[in-house]
Image (spheres, rainbow, N blue to C red):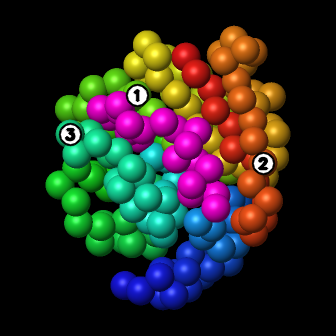
Amino acid sequence: MSSVSDAGVFLTEFIKNPRQLGSIIPSSGFLKRRILRAASLETAGTVVELGPGNGGTTRAILNAMPQTARLLSIELNPGLFELGQQIDDPRYTAHHGDASDLESILTRYNLAPPDVVISGIPFSCMDPAVATSILQMIHRLLNADGRFVAYQVSARVDELNTFYASERRKQEFELLNVPPLRVWRWQK
């Protein structure tokens, strides 16, 4: 599919369920570059992407990570999951499911604890108990020096994500995106 038709699918899925997607259009190139800098993928072995959307950020992650790394993308939305399945890379696994099942999904694909988890899922639209449970699980599952990167409109994800020392947390803004987003990074 072309990027124009991918964006059309993204917009259609946003209209169907706006609380499930964090944005009305896919991430800008500026946002993707900021996410990749925060994720520091150069030495990653296992990378998890929650909410890959139309796959634009997924492709950027694949281009940035080592050839020996593996990428697992988990997408809840069936229409967007279909887009993710079209990505052809032996290092990539697309999974249709819920981020709250991350532990069993990693086991299913025989993946090591993630070095990096990158999330575009809108934590501010989730029930706080569910969001906190997912954040706690990410922290528990991350490798000993793992990183969690979330790009969000709201600061709610940081308010709920109390599992990291404050000095291990960093926030940046990407204004060249619609909407402008915060990019959070927590280091275990």
Which residue is at a point 52% across and 38% down the rendered structure image? Answer: 39
**Quarter of the rendering containing residue 2:** bottom left
User: Measured from the top left, where is residue 14 in percent x and y?
Assistant: 65, 73
Label 3 residue SS: loop
| Mark 3 and mark 2: Cα distance apart in space | 31 Å
Which residue is identified by label 1? 115
Q: Secondary structure at mark 2?
A: strand
User: Distance between the Cα atoms at labels 3 and 1?
Assistant: 13 Å
Instruction: Note whether residue 118 is visible.
Output: yes
Q: Indicate which disc residue 40 carries.
A: none
Is 110 on the left-hand or right-hand side of 50?
A: left
Callout 1 secondary element? loop
Instruction: Look at mark 3 in the image and give the residue it sits on.
Output: 68
Q: Quadrant of residue 89?
A: bottom left
Residue drawn where x is 66% and y is 18% of the image: 168
Q: Nearer the viewer, residue 13 or 53?
A: 53
Which residue is denoted by mark 2 in the rendering? 173
Q: Amino acid at mark 2?
A: Phe
Over which residues does the magenta segment extend?
Answer: 30-48
Asked if the magenta segment contains residue 42, the reply would be: yes
Residue name at image x 80 percent, y 28 percent = 159
